Image: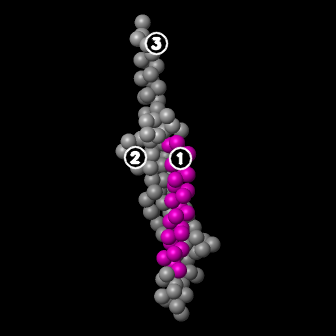
């Protein structure tokens, strides 16, 4: 007879299954890549599913050789906007992959995983 009517074997299996799902979700995020853009595609930023910048591409059309100072500021603004766009996509992807696994956990997250 189980105290409190709990089936410990079933509880352990459920915990193990959740652990496997968590590991898979983390691997999916590690393998994922998102792209943020700004300026109608003049600047593109690729981020990993964990939010790390992997690549930044600036189209030469974004450069005005006759006004270098203004161009520098414009490109900086476009890069920042593209990063923010990509970060929003990463956040959405993380919620998609990890959200179902973190529901019902104390504090609503997983200790040791930033953002969760």
Q: CA distance from mark 3 to mark 2?
A: 33 Å
| Bounds of the magenta segment | 74-99
Q: Earlier in the sequence, mark 2 or mark 1?
A: 1
Question: According to the image, label 3 marks what residue?
Answer: 5
Q: Quadrant of the N terminus?
A: top left
**Residue shown at 38%/42% (left/top)?**
111
Q: Position of residue 5 (x, y in %)?
A: 46, 12
Q: Nearer the viewer, mark 1 or mark 3?
A: 3
Give the mark nearest the N terminus, 3 or 2: 3
When the figure is inspected, residue 53 is found, relative to residue 15, above or below; the finding is below
* Front tag of 3 and 2: 3
**So how many labels did they put on this image?**
3
- Which disc is residue 95 wearing? 1
107 versus 59 height, above or below: above
Along the polypeptide, which appears first: circle 1 or circle 3? Answer: 3
Callout 3: few (<14), some (14-19), or many (20+) C-alpha neighbours within 10 Å? few
């Amino acid at each position: 007879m189980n105290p409190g009517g709990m089936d410990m074997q079933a509880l352990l299996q459920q915990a193990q299954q959740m652990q496997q799902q968590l590991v898979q979700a983390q691997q999916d995020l590690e393998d994922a890549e998102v792209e943020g853009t700004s300026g109608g595609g003049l600047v593109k930023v690729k981020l990993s599913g964990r939010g790390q910048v992997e690549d930044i591409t600036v189209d030469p059309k974004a450069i005005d050789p006759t006004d270098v100072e203004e161009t520098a500021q414009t490109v900086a603004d476009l890069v920042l906007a593209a990063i923010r766009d990509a970060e929003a996509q990463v956040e959405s992807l993380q919620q998609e992959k990890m959200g179902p696994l973190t529901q019902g956990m104390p504090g609503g997250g997983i200790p040791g995983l930033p953002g969760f």
